Image (cartoon, rainbow, N blue to C red):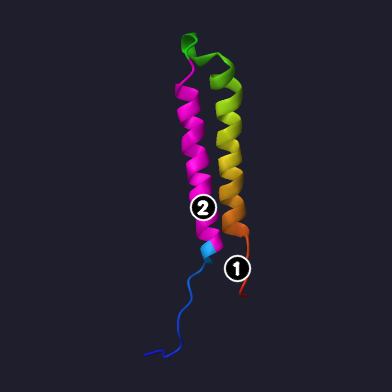
Amino acid sequence: MNSKKEELPFSSANYTMMLIGIALILAGFLIMTLDTTEFGFGFLGLTLGPVVTVLGFIVEFWAILRKPANS
């Protein structure tokens, strides 16, 4: 058995950023569904929702690629 304590691959800041990214992605999809124009061709469905969703994916990638502070 290995007596050395095994560390998690990410720090708590990374996991927090991942949860924020997931929340942004879900919020973006929710914003897109709130559009009341026909076929979702309004501001919410074509502009705001996709931008928030892409920001969520950017936060996710940043959280995964960011090195933990303790290493």
- At x 59%, y 17%, the residue is 43
Percent across and percent down for residue 32 are 49, 24
Instruction: Name the amino acid, label 1.
Output: Pro
As measured in the structure, the alpha-carbon distance from the residue carrying label 2 to the one carrying label 1 is 13 Å
Asked if residue 27 is among those painted magenta in the image, a careful observer would answer: yes
Tell me the residue at 50%/59% (across/down): 15
The outermost residue toward the left is: 1
The overriding secondary structure of the stretch rendered in magenta is helix
Span of residues in magenta: 13-35
Q: Is residue 27 above or below residue 41?
A: below
Name the residue: 61% across, 39% down: 55
> Neighbour class for label 2 at 10 Å: few (<14), some, many (≥20)?
many
Q: Can residue 9 be found in the magenta stretch?
A: no
48 vs 37, left or right, is right
Residue 18's label in the rendered image is 2
Amino acid type of the residue tagged 2 in the rendering: Met
Q: Secondary structure at mark 1?
A: loop
Mark 2 / mark 1, whichever is N-terminal: 2
Residue lying farthest top?
A: 38
Query: Which residue occupies 63% across, 70% down?
Result: 69
Residue 30 or 41: which is nearer the viewer?
A: 30
| x and y percentages locating residue 19 in the rendered image | 48, 51
Image quarter hosting the C terminus: bottom right
Circle 1 residue: 68
Q: Nearer the viewer, residue 24 or 57?
A: 24
For the residue pair 16 and 25, the one nearer the viewer reads as: 16
Secondary structure beneath dot 2 equals helix
What percent of the width, then of the height, locates residue 41?
54, 13
